[in-house]
Amino acid sequence: MVKNYPDSWYAASASLGEVAPSLEAIEDADICVIGGGFTGLSAALTLAEAGRQVVLLEAARVGWGASGRNGGQLIRGFVGQDRVAKHWGASRAKDVQDLTWAGHDLIRRRIDEYDIDCDLTPGWLEVAPTPRQLAMLYHSYNEMETTFPDRGFHMMGARELADTMGSDKYQGGLLSLSDGHLHPLKLCLGLYEACLRKGVRVFEYSPVTRIEEGTVATVHTDKGRVKANHVVLAANAHHALYPMKLGGLAFPAGSFLIATEPLPDDQLNRLNPNRYAICDTKKVCDYFRMSADGRVLFGGRVNFSGRKPKSIRDKLMPRLLAIWPELEDVKVTHEWGGKLGVSLGEVPLVGRVGDNVWYSFGYTGHGVNMGNLMGEILGEAITGHMGRFELFAGVPKRRLPIGRWLGTQAVSSAIFYYWLKDRL
Ligand SMILES: Cc1cc2nc3c(=O)[nH]c(=O)nc-3n(C[C@H](O)[C@H](O)[C@H](O)COP(=O)(O)OP(=O)(O)OC[C@H]3O[C@@H](n4cnc5c(N)ncnc54)[C@H](O)[C@@H]3O)c2cc1C
């Protein structure tokens, strides 16, 4: 089945370009990358920049998966001293903490170097719907100010926040000027162009059916093969290539978005004059922002199963109106959804199958930063710089010892649990 881009505002507003050929021959490469999202594109680009011969195979189109559909919120990684210390121990916690902004820095460097126009806009506002979550936000602010005093954090009480976002729904907010938002599909396509410029051979509509491991691995599609010294598995939680070794580590959870028609400037300036990305502090959060052409992009959970509802608009619009009631008559022009890989241990799942099949997935809603960073980390590991790879590969992985169907039920139950907890 031909899987084109979903009917998203992103696909409608990006230059999608010609479809790349599909693999119909035998190719030789140093590295074969499977998956054309942030992880795969970033790994391919890192490797091509290091002079390696790279083939990238994508089952659909580049940016077809979560990377081309997400909320576009560019959120820092690896924060929370407790969480970092829990997984890495005090001795390595600092090394991990130092990577908090590395994904952002990488994205900015590539935007500059490869002249990628993806509407990058500074400012991310976390907003607290309950007093308990406001207290957690103050805790987070104190931690951020201590650890990163120059990163532009600012804590807002309810009144300042209401002026900043044209709504008094929230108790307070934490602004970070070092985070922000962007057009994720344009970033994917820009990275794709950069890969082509560096000589990466990209094949679309080329789903990998099997990997034959060996010193030289053979990656099979229906009509072709790639022989490579290394394989990068960057297929998110969609893939089913290693059910025994990688199954049960992460599960696909559904998240959905709507885009409205463009709003007039005076309304935009009343609702979000600084055009910050906004996300509430709930585990199962609502996230929203204005697009470069003045639409509201609003996303979140629509049910506990993660399955696409009949109308995404009908599910999300009441939540948007609870924040900005004046948008009652605004038209919704696009609605779409996607699957994000939820890892059981809240840490990206990074490692190797055998000696030369490398993987990274399970960013649990933080993959704009982490997908780009982890792709770079896989690429540099393959060129012999193992330090940052080992930092993540060494974290013990938790697995549900049950089948995929039960795993999906477990994710639904977990989402329900967090939904209840978020209400406190
Ligand atoms: C609706 C939604 C909103 C989100 N919002 C945010 C956000 O605001 N901020 C944030 O940081 N993160 C967000 N995320 C998470 C983020 O998008 C992901 O973590 C990240 O994009 C994952 O990147 P990836 O490259 O690992 O996977 P993907 O982008 O999913 O790419 C994997 C690719 O592999 C391909 N593939 C799969 N199987 C095969 C195969 N057998 N052969 C060849 N190719 C294959 C797929 O077609 C796909 O294109 C969101 C996710 C979703 C779904």
Image: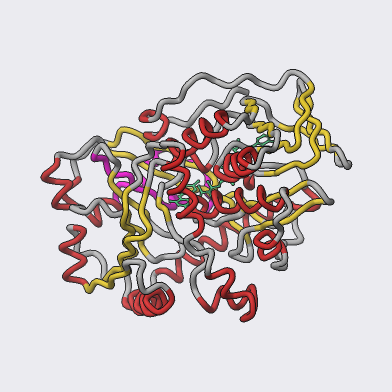
Where on the picture, by quarter, is residue 134? bottom left
Q: Is residue 309 left or right of residue 23?
A: left
Q: Can residue 173 be seen by looking at this rendering?
A: yes
Give how far across and how far down residue 239 sits, in percent. 68, 42
Q: Nearer the viewer, residue 159 or 28?
A: 28
Look at the image and say whether residue 299 sits in the magenta stretch.
Answer: yes
The residue positioned farthest toward the left in the image shown: 266
Q: Can residue 424 be seen by looking at this rendering?
A: no
Give how far across and how far down residue 99 sits, in percent. 53, 64
Which quadrant holds the C terminus? bottom left
Where on the picture, by quarter, is residue 126? bottom left
Q: Which residues are magenta?
A: 294-318
Look at the image and say whether residue 351 sits in the magenta stretch.
Answer: no
Q: Residue at x 14, y 42 (%)?
A: 265
Q: Nearer the viewer, residue 166 or 58?
A: 58
Q: Residue at x 65, y 44 (%)?
A: 234
Q: How is the image coloured?
A: secondary structure
Residue 26 position (above or below residue 279) = above
Q: Nearer the viewer, residue 314 or 259?
A: 259
Give how far across and how far down residue 30 sits, in percent. 76, 36
Ligand 1 falls in which quarter? top right
Q: Residue at x 25, y 56 (%)?
A: 322
Q: Is residue 23 left or right of residue 273?
A: right
Give how far across and how far down residue 120 sits, in percent. 35, 46
Residue 388 position (above or below residue 240) = below
